[in-house]
Image (cartoon, coloured by chain):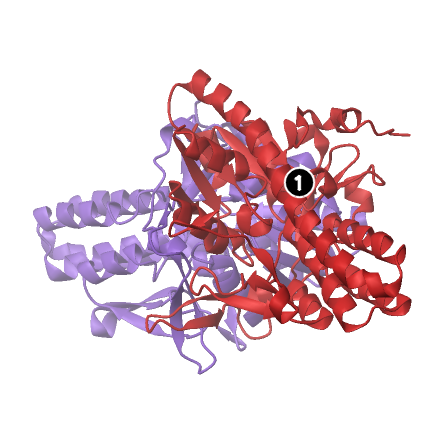
Chain colours: A purple, B red
Amino acid sequence: MKIDGKSWRTIWPDRASDAVCIIDQTLLPHRFEIRQIGSLQDMVHAIKTMQVRGAPLIGAAAAYGMVLAMLENQADDHLQHAAQCLIASRPTAVNLSWAVRRMQAELAALKAEARIELAWREAARIADEDVHLNQAIARHGLGLLQRLAAEKGRKLNVLTHCNAGWLATVDWGTALAPVYAAHDSGLPVHVWVDETRPRNQGASLTAWELGCHGVPHTVISDNAGGHLMQHGEVDMVIVGADRVTASGDVCNKIGTYLKALAAFDNGVPFYAAVPSPTIDWTIRDGLREIEIEHRDAQEVATMQGLLTDGSVAAVHLLPPGSAALNPAFDVTPARLVSGIICERGVVRPDSLHALFEQSLD
Amino acid sequence: MKIDGKSWRTIWPDRASDAVCIIDQTLLPHRFEIRQIGSLQDMVHAIKTMQVRGAPLIGAAAAYGMVLAMLENQADDHLQHAAQCLIASRPTAVNLSWAVRRMQAELAALKAEARIELAWREAARIADEDVHLNQAIARHGLGLLQRLAAEKGRKLNVLTHCNAGWLATVDWGTALAPVYAAHDSGLPVHVWVDETRPRNQGASLTAWELGCHGVPHTVISDNAGGHLMQHGEVDMVIVGADRVTASGDVCNKIGTYLKALAAFDNGVPFYAAVPSPTIDWTIRDGLREIEIEHRDAQEVATMQGLLTDGSVAAVHLLPPGSAALNPAFDVTPARLVSGIICERGVVRPDSLHALFEQSLD
């Protein structure tokens, strides 16, 4: 999508330097900096520290991580080692292991000397596929928004949690793809942006990318969405997902479940926008079976922002001696989800398997 | 309650200086500073800027504000003026207007020259009454916790939102009064503390006062409570209230409604601890009838904390050009509330009026 009128992706190859470039998302919205990633180890670090984040982008970043590994050493054992390191870098996003396994299978089938070239091609294909999936999500979600706008007869208010915009993907985004499509088509839409503590991806990333693209939006504390729904100020909730089960349970950023409860309680439609690589067909019960990543408690104990002198700093929030806990995701049961917007269309969560011709046995 | 083993209240008279002392709560947990408030105008400022906050403490502070007004001028018109200024200083807390009206009625009945002495006495009585109400809440809530502990057979985990501890009252607190009573009686209890954006009263005040008193606690982001409830990590939710309707709707800090929804969805008991001055018998429908204060959007756009050099600073969180909205309270419908803990006992919200012999017509 656009920054100051210029089109960007979140990740791109720099073959002349045997490297991959990313937008460092830990510095947004205060600094826009590009990082050149030149080794497997650096890509693992970029994923772990969330310089790249968002399930679809992590998938593409891991694919390029496999390219960087092949540039270092094309042998089978390094291929195996790289796959293990990348899969271990973040536990929740299913796209990560999906992309790594795909790269690994393709590369393992070739002789070592042919692996670098194929790796570059296959990683680019994974990145391009992400963009195409998200464009399809944009089309299907736009249909939903158009029907809702016709019904309401006024500007729509969409609430989103965390960042599932283009910064969370290679381009377009998942939850925000329908919003961008609506905005670009002239359908008036305003976005309520949950700030999304503790890492503030809403206030930092979603607000930034919506602003860069010119989409009207307002940042709210994570506590405010239920109140706004009670007062008719939210027409639809759209979130992304880090993993969706075969039964339609949605694992997404911590706090998503609370918004789904409020949407259900107030008759507000609640959608998850999900490209198929985010669906884990091996899992039925999201609450019992998905391992929830606990991140460093320091994320809760601190907040990063801009000081009046223009420098970026973290402030410490807790009294000395107070502990914090930081579960990073939660699971919204399928019963609270109005529908899943995926590249093949919009379905009720209990029909997801049918849409993708998957057995639920 | 105690700080380093010494007992404190949040507000106390300093008659030798014709002043009232408060703990400045805007600097906690990083600085502990006492402010001497010497005029009506300074008390209005202390309430508006939340140097004192919490519905019961605001009531006591407003009562002492009436004392300071009388020290300035005992005439009828100044009495009237003082009442108006204080009531306008915060719109949501019903205790504020309750305390001011009570002071005003008592003072108006006397000749001007007798008003100062009565004002000191009556304000002290309002403060002492708050402490006694909260001690009664502590006893009734302790009974609930004891029964729950007997049932669970292990340490209890209580979740609370915002600060309804002793800092929100004159002493003891409302939501935390049963927790202090349990802890002091040797019943093992651990508190999940919602940080409570945007002003972070949980992370700043609740964590601080629990820590000072030695109560085990863990700070979590406002997004995390639902997930913890899904996994059996919360045995009870106890919150305070800024206003409770005759029908048992609970108006409290923004985000309370989301926790009530999650508690209901997971079969976790959800209680509001409420001294009777917080009940507004004139209101039946909390959602339609309670005016919700919208505070400065800067509270959402910034976060105050400690820099590594030990100074307290606010960091700015939003991209340039992104707006924010800051509704400060929400209303939890009575249907989601397991019970109200008040000085007369614990009742279901629909029996509140009966407990206080109030008509619902």
- Residue positioned 57% across, 45% down in the render: B164
Q: Quadrant of residue B295?
A: bottom right
Give the farthest residue toward the bottom: A309
Along the viewing direction, whichever of B240 and B268 lies nearer the viewer: B240
Residue at horizontal 30 percent and vertical 71 percent from the top: A35
Q: Residue at x 51, y 30 (%)?
A: B236
**At 46% across and 53% down in the image, what residue appears?**
B203
Chain to which mark 1 belongs:
A
Residue A95 lies, in percent from the top left, at 36, 45
Asked whether residue B283 is in view, the answer is yes
A16 lies left or right of B180: left
Task: Name above or below for residue A54 compared with residue A242.
Answer: below
Left or right of B204 in this view: B173: right
Quadrant location of residue B42? bottom right
- Image coordinates of residue A188 in percent, x first then y, are 72, 61
Q: Nearer the viewer, residue B158 or B178?
A: B178
Q: Is residue B235 above or below residue A72?
A: above
